[in-house]
Amino acid sequence: MAALCAAIILPGLASCHSLDDDRVPVQPVNIVFPTVAEWNVYSGVSGALTWNRFIRQERIPSKFPYTANTYTGFGGVLLVCDVLGNPQAFDLACPVECRQNVRVAVKVDDEHLAVCPECGSKYNVFSLMGHPVSGEAARKGYALRRYRVGPGLGGDYMVVSY
């Protein structure tokens, strides 16, 4: 009987602390840097606490060589270098608002958080992997959608993909 009660109660308790990072619709993401030199020139993330936005529809960044096979997710991609110097990627769309044109922006201040201009939710993208730290997103447990960053196939230096 105790095992049955534990099986029913424990999953409910665990779910109270889970985060939902699936609210933003799934869209393809493919940003390729064919060489280390192109990563260094175009990524914009060269060390801890650096970041850049990739929004194909708006040609941001303007000098990035977008191709027909470049995709930047639902609201665009926020590429960051975390506090340990590792690249991380998130969708720019706020998961509370779930609209392509409502994008979080990194505030360069003492906190270094990504902030939604509509709902005011704040996300830690440099040390907590896009987890909400305040606002409606924190109350509801909505995290930024994460994308995988890693070596590409065929000699590509880095690929950001879902």
Image (tube, rainbow, N blue to C red):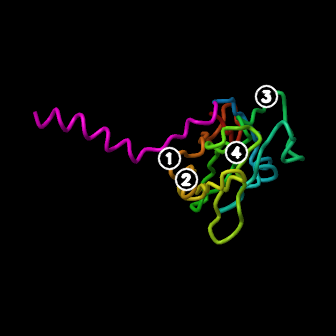
Kindly check if marks 2 and 1 are in contact, taking CB atoms under 8 A apart as contact.
yes
The residue that disc 3 covers is 69
Residue at image mark 2: 132
Distance from disc 3 to disc 4, alpha carbons, whole Å, reads: 19 Å
Q: Quadrant of the C terminus?
A: top right
- The magenta stretch is 1-25
Spatial CA span between label 3 and label 2: 31 Å
What residue sits right under mark 4 in the picture? 92
Mark 1 lies on a secondary structure that is loop
Vertical side of 4 occupied by 40: above or below: below
Name the residue carrying label 1. Answer: 141
Residue at point 70%, 48% (across, down)? 78
Q: Are marks 4 and 1 in contact (CB under 8 Å)?
A: no
Q: Earlier in the sequence, mark 3 or mark 2?
A: 3
Q: Earlier in the sequence, mark 1 or mark 3?
A: 3
59 above or below 52? above
Q: What type is the residue that disc 4 sits on?
A: Leu
For this view, does 9 lie left or right of residue 90? left
93 in magenta:
no
Is 132 in front, or is 43? Answer: 132
Label 2 SS: strand
